[in-house]
Each structure stands twice: as structure tokens, then as C-alpha cells.
Image (cartoon, rainbow, N blue to C red):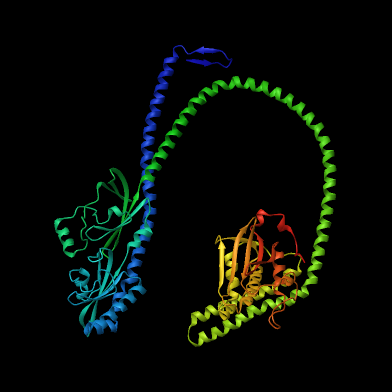
Amino acid sequence: MLWMSSTGKRWICGESSSLLRSCGFLFFLAAGTLLVVLVFMTARFTTRQGLRDLAGESNARLELYVSYLQGVLEKYEGLPELLATNKRLVSFMKKPGGRDRIEALNRYLATINDISDAADTYLMDREGLTIAASNWDAERPFIGRNFSYRPYFKQAMQGQLGRYFALGTTSSRRGYYFAYPVRSNGEILGAVVVKINIDKVEHNWGHRDETFLVTDPDSVIFLSTNPAWRFQALHSLSPAVKARIEQSRRYPKARLTPLPILVSNPTDTGTLLTLLENGRKKEYLQQSRTMPQAGWQVHILSDTKHVRLLVRRTLIGTGAAFILVVVLVLMYRQQRLRMQEQRYHEEESRRMLEQVNLDLEQRVSERTSALSEVNSQLRLEIGDRRRAEEKLRHARKELIHTAKLAAIGQMATGINHELNQPLAAIRAYGANGRELLIKGRIEEAISNFDRIAELTERMAGIGSQLKIFSRKSRGNLSSLPLQGVIDGALEILMPLLGKTGIKIGIDLDPADIKVRTNSLLLQQALVNLITNGIHSVQGQENPIVGVTGRFFEDMVRIEVRDNGPGVDVADREKVFDPFYTTKPSGQGLGLGLTITRRIIEEMDGHIYLEEKGTFTTFVVLLHQDSAEYPGKHEKVGVNL
């Protein structure tokens, strides 16, 4: 073996070479033994910890699933008892009557079935014969069929609440049955039965790495998120159990074969099951909970592949770390032998670098002096330009603010115009609320008062626009769904729409289109435009008022159109002028479109009038998002 001395000369470990080879062999033997022990302990600990974590997560889901099942059953548990006290059913059981009375009862049970969202509701006499059913008009109704062999009927005839899960012999559909006796003066006349469909339980709880099972007292799986396991058993059934199941016709035509469980290993976290699926072995962690009232056993089988993957990754990481430590120890020995030689070269390199650094520092000092003079001149020029730009912005703001104050007189009249619509809506909702309170319809009255509160908030917001307009800043803009803004405008116009009977067509493409706007301002503008459309189409044979929203290049194009008489060519240039109106005296001030134009321009948008065929269309263009147009949204004030 060759080694380097501190002087850089090589020497041979003569007789000591065999000793070093022996020490190296012992070192690698000890390292290999330690690696095997470390891998074994790590695998054992990681597997146990992984199963604990998996059991904790699965147990929480199992508790939720059991609670969900109990909630589904408790929802319908009291319904049969409630129906059994129904005078109509008791009277029918005493005196069934003719065909008309039976048909009326069938329709009554169908109505109850629809309201309760049950699968079937039917009435049986004391012999087990079905005399009325909600599925009376189905292809295979229950009427005329005898279900006296069912355990739920036997329990009901003993005066108890009958419970039972089975496949329907008529419908071949799974269901849970509740039955309760119908009594008259203490005598049991028959039973009323409610069947509920619990198929949705499987759809709502399916998971690719977990399988939920629900078994009956005989360990037969009747609910499973794995369809292939339905109507199989957790273990082999005895001939007596199979005979009893066939006698009750609980699972007709079901083979009731056991699951292909190869290994079952109980642990402190659950039972580890190894199943044969599609010719391949698969391991699950099984945990169970009991539902004593229903007589069910609920199980969750969690795939342990993530635990096995965690163990493999941990072992790979542990082995890699151990090997890395061994390699580092060997490298450390070799590194020490090279350190002295490197120190000499480092000292030589350091002296050369110091000389180079001195030369560079001198050159940098010369260049820095020249750059400092240039930077001083640039700073002076930049300062002068910033001051000039600040004066220009200040002058522009003052000019715009002065123009805005001059328009406040017109806006004050416009605010009065805009408040008339919410006030009319408040009067309508107030009158309706008073009538609803008199009739005892409290919830509907509260809904009217909530709408009144929303309208008062809008009136307050309309008033605040005068303050916003008079300041040097404008209302905040944000990216909002256009559908929500239109819904708010239609809520304000609800009294007018109800009075005129005109329906507003909404067409947004896409439906979730967003626009850069202020919700209150855009609502105010849409209320004005839709109101004009409603007034225009009054008296038309087929009135049409519609609102559309589309992307248009880098903006959103909103159209409010109607098929009214339209606007004369001579008047199209005047429609946005203050106090200009074509309505009869007393029906408008002529400020709605003026205010609307100022609102749209306040939001950096545009509005104009188009005539398309038989439609009069007001087009509004607004930005999609300020992030895409930063320069356009820095403008202050409104274009007057």
C-alpha cells in the first residue's frame, strides 16, 4: 500500500501492509453487520409507525362513515311510526273500500314517498299482503304481493319497529326496510313499511386506496365501495346459515362465496389481511365498528402500499446514509494525507491572488472616480425631471378637479333621479312585507325586509358617489364576476319588472366572465340602461330586453339591447347630453344616460349607441384586468 509523507515522498508499508488489510476486512465486516441490524430495526420501526399513522387516518374516516350511515337511517327511522298514526291509513285498514279509495291511497303514499325521498312506501294487512303502495303505477308494483316471510313484517306484527336490509324480491334492488304496526284500539291491523335506497352511500364514500364494507350479522357484505365484493362473506358460511338466508330471501340469487383472504394477522392497530385480487396479492389494514341498532358491522380496508413504499424509501435512505458515512470516513483518511501538499499550493496561490487584487483595486479606483462624476450629473438631471413631472401631474389633477366640481350641480340632480328607483322598490317590498306579516308568513316577510336593507345600503352608496366624485380620487376598481353585478341590478329592478311583466334575457360567454369595475357604479349604470330598455319596449307586441357579455380584443363588451322604436338619426348625438329625454313630461329628467356615461368613463371604459336591425343597443367596453393595462388605470378623475 502506498502512502504520502509530509515531505511529499512516497513510502511502502512493508510488513504493516498485511495488518492494514486485516483491519480493513474487519472494518467492512463490522460495517456490513451494523448495516443489516440497522436495516432490520429501521424496517420494523417504520412499518409499525406507518401502520399507526394509517390506522389513525382510517379510523377517523371510519367514524365519519359510521356517523353518515347512522344519519341516513335516523332520517327515516321515525317515518313509519308517524305514518302508522295517520287517521287516513288507520281508516283504510278498517274499511278498505272500493277501487277508487285504493287508488287515492296509492297516490297519497306516492306523494309521501316523493316528499321523504324514500325508495318505496307501502301498506300491508295482518296477513302480509300489500294492499297499497307508492309504486302502484310501476312496471312491477308491490300491490297484491305477500311479504309475510320478511323479518321486518314479523317484528312489526309483534308490536315492534321492524328493521331489515335485503335485496327486493320484486325490484331486485338493495334497500333498508323500516316497518311499524298500524293499530286501532290496541289491535294490530297491519304494518306500514318504508324502504330507503342506500346505493348513494357507496358513491359518496368511494376512494381508490380505501374500501368501505358493511356486513350483516352473518358477515355477508351487502354494501361495498368495491362492487366485486358485494354479496360475498368475510368467511365461509355454514349450511344452516345459508339455509336461513335463503328462507328469508334476503339475497336472492347471491352465491355468498367467501372473500379470497390468504392471510389474516391481528395487530394492535387492526387486522392485516392479504387478499388475492385478479391473480395478485394485495395487503389491507382492516378496522371495524359496530352499529348495534341496525345490526351491522362497518369495516374499512386501507391499502398498505403507501406504508410499504414508506418502508422502502426509509430503508433506501438509511442504507444510503450509512454508506455515505463509511465513504466519508475513508475519504477523511485520504484527505488528511493530501492536506499538507495542498497547503503549499494554497500559499502560492494566495500570494498570486493578492498581487492580482492590488492591480484590480487600483483600476477599479480609477474607473469609480470617473463614474462618480457621471452619476452626480445624472442625479441632478433626474431630480429636475421629477420635479417637472410632479408639477405637471399636480396641474393636471387641479384642472380635472375643477372640472369635476363644475359638474357637481348636474350630478346632484342625477342622484335624485337614481334614488327614485330604490325608493319605489322599498315601497313595494314594505307593502308586501306588511301583508306577509298579517298573513303570518314570517320568513317571506323577513326576506322582504332584508331586501329593503340592501336597497337602503345601495341608496347610501349612491349618495356617497357625490363625495367620491368631488374628491381627487376615484372609487376602487377590482376584478368582479359580471353575473353578480347584473344580478344586483335586476334585484333593484324587480318591482318594475313585476309591474311590467317584461323578462330580461342574460347571455354571458363564458358564464364566469370577469370585468375590472366598481360593483356599485356598474350596477347603477346597468339599472339606467335596462330601465331605458324597459320603457322603450312597453307597448310592443313581443317586447325583448337583453344583456350580453363577451370578450372583445383586450376588453369586455357588454350590450344592453331592446326592440323598441329606436332613436332617430337626428337624436343619436344628443342621447348622452344632460336633461335631454324623449319620454313624456314627468317620466324622466334626461340624466340617466349622462350619469351612465360618466360612470363608465370613471372606470376607464367607453359607451356608445348602435342600431342593429330592429334592436337599439347600448355598448359598454370595460377592461378585463388592470394588471394587463397598467398605464390605462393610472388616470385620475373623470373625463368631463
User: Where residue 423 sits in the image (x, y, percent)?
Assistant: 64, 80
Residue 409 or residue 209, whichever sits in front: 409
In the image, residue 358 above or below residue 594: above
* Residue 481 in view in this figure: no
Q: Which of the image's four quarters has the C terminus?
A: bottom right
User: Where residue 147 sits in the image (x, y, percent)?
Assistant: 20, 70
Residue 15 or residue 397, whichever sits in front: 397
Residue 261 or residue 31, whichever sits in front: 261
For residue 342, side relative to residue 475 (left or right): left
In the image, residue 283 above or below residue 98: above
Rendered residue at 38%/57% (across/down) = 61
Q: How many marks?
A: 0
Residue 361 or residue 120, whichever sits in front: 120
In the image, residue 423 above or below residue 515: below
User: Where residue 124 sits in the image (x, y, percent)?
Assistant: 22, 76
Rendered residue at 42%/22% (across/down) = 24
Quadrant of the rendered structure where residue 416 is?
Answer: bottom right
* Residue 212 in view in this figure: yes
For residue 20, side relative to residue 386 (left or right): left
Quadrant of the rendered structure where residue 494 is?
Answer: bottom right
User: Where residue 181 sits in the image (x, y, percent)?
Assistant: 23, 77
